[in-house]
Image: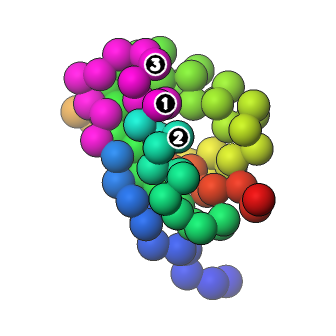
Amino acid sequence: MSAPLPIAVEVDARDMLCPLPVLKARKALKGVQPGELIQVLATDPAADADFKAFCEATGHELVNFENTADGVLQFTIAKAAA
């Protein structure tokens, strides 16, 4: 089993409401290569559904989702191949 890829970019979208977390993630994804990972930190309760829909619509892969003990939602997204 290979080691997971490191996070290329971390996007801090805490305390931002929809659609800002997704817009910041979209901008970050433009700056990484296909297959590279970004991690988004958000506190908007709607972000869970927003990121699932965003990844389905764009072809990016939602690799991991965690709701941390302190209420921060962590999304790890792999950029889709061009």
User: Residue 77: horizontal and vertical position, in percent?
Assistant: 56, 50
Describe the colour scheme in one phrase.
rainbow
Q: From this viewpoint, is residue 78 visible?
A: yes
> Separation of disc 1 and disc 3 at Cα?
6 Å
Q: Quadrant of the C terminus?
A: bottom right
- Residue 22's disc is 1
User: Residue 1: horizontal and vertical position, in percent?
Assistant: 67, 83
Residue lying at 58% horizontally and 21% vertically, measured from the top left: 49
- Residue 26's disc is 2
| SS at mark 3 in the image | loop
Q: Is residue 48 left or right of residue 67?
A: right
| SS at mark 1 in the image | helix
Number of other residues with Cα within 10 Å of mark 1, as a class: few under 14, some 14 to 19, many 20 or more: many
Residue at the limit of the structure toward the bottom, as seen here = 2
> Separation of disc 1 and disc 2 at Cα?
6 Å
* Magenta segment boundaries in residue numbering: 12-23
- Contact between marks 1 and 2 (CB within 8 A): the answer is yes
Q: From this viewpoint, is residue 68 visible?
A: no
Residue 15 lies within the magenta run: yes
Residue lying at 75% horizontally and 34% vertically, measured from the top left: 56
| SS at mark 2 in the image | helix
Q: Is residue 54 left or right of residue 3?
A: right
Location of residue 8 with respect to 27 vertically, above or below: below
- Contact between marks 1 and 3 (CB within 8 A): the answer is yes
The three-letter amino acid code for the residue at tag 3 is Pro
User: Residue 71: horizontal and vertical position, in percent?
Assistant: 28, 28
| Residue at the disc numbered 3 | 19
Q: Please tell me in which quadrant of the rendered image residue 50 appears.
A: top right
